[in-house]
Image (spheres, rainbow, N blue to C red):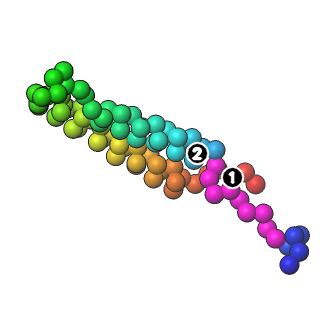
Amino acid sequence: MSDKNQKQADPLFGKENYMWMAIGGVIIALGMFLMSGGKNQDPKVFDYNVVYSTTRVTVAPILIILGLLVEVYAIFKKSKTTE
């Protein structure tokens, strides 16, 4: 088969898809950062409010799930092709 007969393949993702993927990655990273730990002043004392804070238990998982949804959107979004 010659090179003339082969059709040029379109890229799988466009620039906008990669932008959405980067946004989703930043949201996931922010959620992971918020979920990572607070530090007790005294390591021998368990502080319930630091370990089970609203930010770590509620906000961070919501951000991670939101970031994953943005990633799914970025993957399935049709890229705009001009012909």
What residue range appears in magenta?
A: 6-14
Q: For the residues marked 2 and 1, what is the alpha-carbon distance in whole angstroms?
A: 15 Å
Q: Chief secondary structure of the magenta span?
A: loop
The image quarter containing residue 78 is: bottom right
Quadrant in which the C terminus appears: bottom right
Residue 79 coordinates in the image, percent (x, y): 61, 52
* Tally of marks: 2
Residue that label 1 marks: 81
Q: Quadrant of the N terminus?
A: bottom right
N-terminal-most mark, 2 or 1: 2
Residue where numbered disc 2 is placed: 18
Disc 2 or disc 1, which is closer to the eye? 2
Q: Amino acid at mark 1?
A: Thr
For mark 1, give the secondary structure: loop
Q: Using the image, determine if residue 60 lies above or below residue 80.
A: above
12 on left or right of 37? right
Residue 15: x percent and y percent?
64, 44
Tell me the residue at 89%/74% (across/down): 2
Q: Position of residue 21 (x, y in %)?
A: 52, 45
Along the viewing direction, whichever of 63 and 36 lies nearer the viewer? 36
In this view, 83 is above or below 38: below
Magenta stretch containing residue 73, yes or no?
Answer: no
